[in-house]
Image (spheres, rainbow, N blue to C red):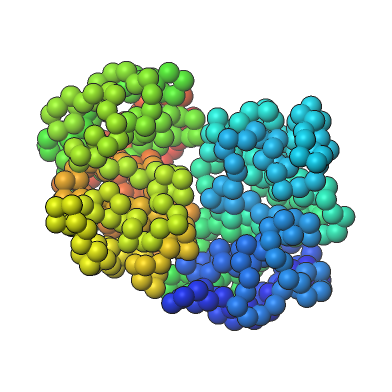
Amino acid sequence: MSVLAARNLSKSYPGVRALADVSMELRENEILGLIGQNGSGKSTLLKIFTGVEQPTNGSLLLRGNETVIRSPLAAASLGIGMVHQEQSLITNLTVAENIFFDKKAAGKRYGFFNWRTLNKAAERQLAKLECDIPPDIRVEQLSFPERQLVEFAKVLAVEELIDEQLVILFDEPTSLLSPSEIDGLFRQIRRLKERASIVFVSHRMDEVLEISDRVHVMSNGENVAERTPSQTDHKELYHLMVGTRRSEDYFLEERRKDKSSAPPSLQAERLSVDGAFNDVSLVVREGEILAITGVAGSGAEEFCRALFGLEDGVSGRIIFNGKEQSLNARPSDLIGQGIGYVSAERKIEGVVTGRTIADNIVLSFGSSLGTGMFVDRDREIDAALGWMKRLKVKAPNAAEYVERLSGGNQQKVSLAKWLLSENLRLLILDHPTRGLDPGAKADLFEAIRDLSDHGISIVFVSETLEETLGMADTVVVMRDGKVSATFPNLYKEKPKPEKIVEAMV
């Protein structure tokens, strides 16, 4: 029996058609994998299911009845919950407040809170995930994986609102989770399947094939194919998503070169931040791509933020282009010296919502396109369009609002704003491929390799071992805030993956 069904859904925005006559159904007690490139229409479909967007044409059927879902609050009352890729938590509220923000709960009455009761209710939801996150802690104090678990707990609370079959939507839920955390998440998804129907969105084909009962493939806003895991494999799914391009094409290994004799671009000497990382030393040479990898909590992300002046209490030395940098330097100072940073939190630190693609691309260096104090808007638009074309940003024009783009296209925009700089010498990328499909990864990594070929140094926190070994000239492994291993000169010989894993754990 169908629990949730789309019938000939279409959704159009000015200049672009996001969905074109899409029909699909989610059956009782099944896990439906949903895959497609960034911009294929997956996110738009989920937004319609949760009442964030309304379809231009077509209809929804919920438990056999035609339904109009007008808001996320209405969706929750109907038993539809969503774990977001771009986390929906309010960071200055507590975990408990976030879990019950959009729901009725014991401990909430007429705008007043009984904190003890509310926290106990939150503890029950967190216990379902076998985690010990304090319910009274503010979300801003949590790591990304911990926030992801709170997102999940927020959705699990829907279980207690309705007695009918639930619908739970997972949008890239495993981003930045460790293997053990992913195992725990999958246990909970399988538990939920006993009384829920689940849509699971991921670009990781192994996860989709492992957890799904059926797989639905989308491309350019249309239905492409439906498969069962037993009847397909990684190769076919990639082909259905991106055409003839293979999943490994984006690594461009044949372009890896010997950088061992190039002069140093960045030297970090015994760099430390209390509670995050300690005595980290490394060298990045001109044109070198250095990958930092480690499990959640390794300190890799905080180290990259420290390089860009985003961490307090830094000690040690940073030498850039032969000059020692002040450890109190602000990001604006470092930008002027030729350092750029693409954050893993693209919607918080990567792009400015409410502004256009062009506004975002020229945000940091648009002044170089003007004359004196005057802005040359035509030159800004031309520059934005140029980088949109080079990075294959899927949008009708540069005047499109950035929040209307898919996550992968937003990531390309957050990268483009740094590429506009004529002074760029070092680019720091924190999980640049999170949520990107294979085609978008291909475009991104080709741009990164082009930057490397032009002498720009790259430091990136990698998403997977496959990316690490495929793209990096040097791999630095961090564990518990320290460097546990370094693998240089990958142009000669790549280390075995198990060697890197041993250093990580």
Residue 375 locus on image (x, y percent)? 22, 58
Residue 36 locus on image (x, y percent)? 51, 66
The answer to whether 283 is drawn above or below residue 50 in the figure is above
Q: Which residue is pictured at 51% across the width and 58% down the height?
A: 203
Q: Is residue 347 left or right of residue 155?
A: left
Q: Which residue is pictured at 56% across the width and 67% down the height?
A: 44
> Can residue 204 be seen at all in this image of the molecule?
yes
Q: Is residue 401 left or right of residue 182?
A: left
> Can residue 223 be seen at all in this image of the molecule?
no
Residue 332 locus on image (x, y percent)? 27, 37
Q: Which residue is pictured at 53% across the width and 50% down the height?
A: 86
Q: Is residue 84 left or right of residue 416?
A: right
The quadrant where residue 478 appears: top left
Quadrant that contains the N terminus: bottom right
Residue 369 locus on image (x, y percent)? 18, 57
The answer to whether 47 is drawn above or below residue 308 in the figure is below
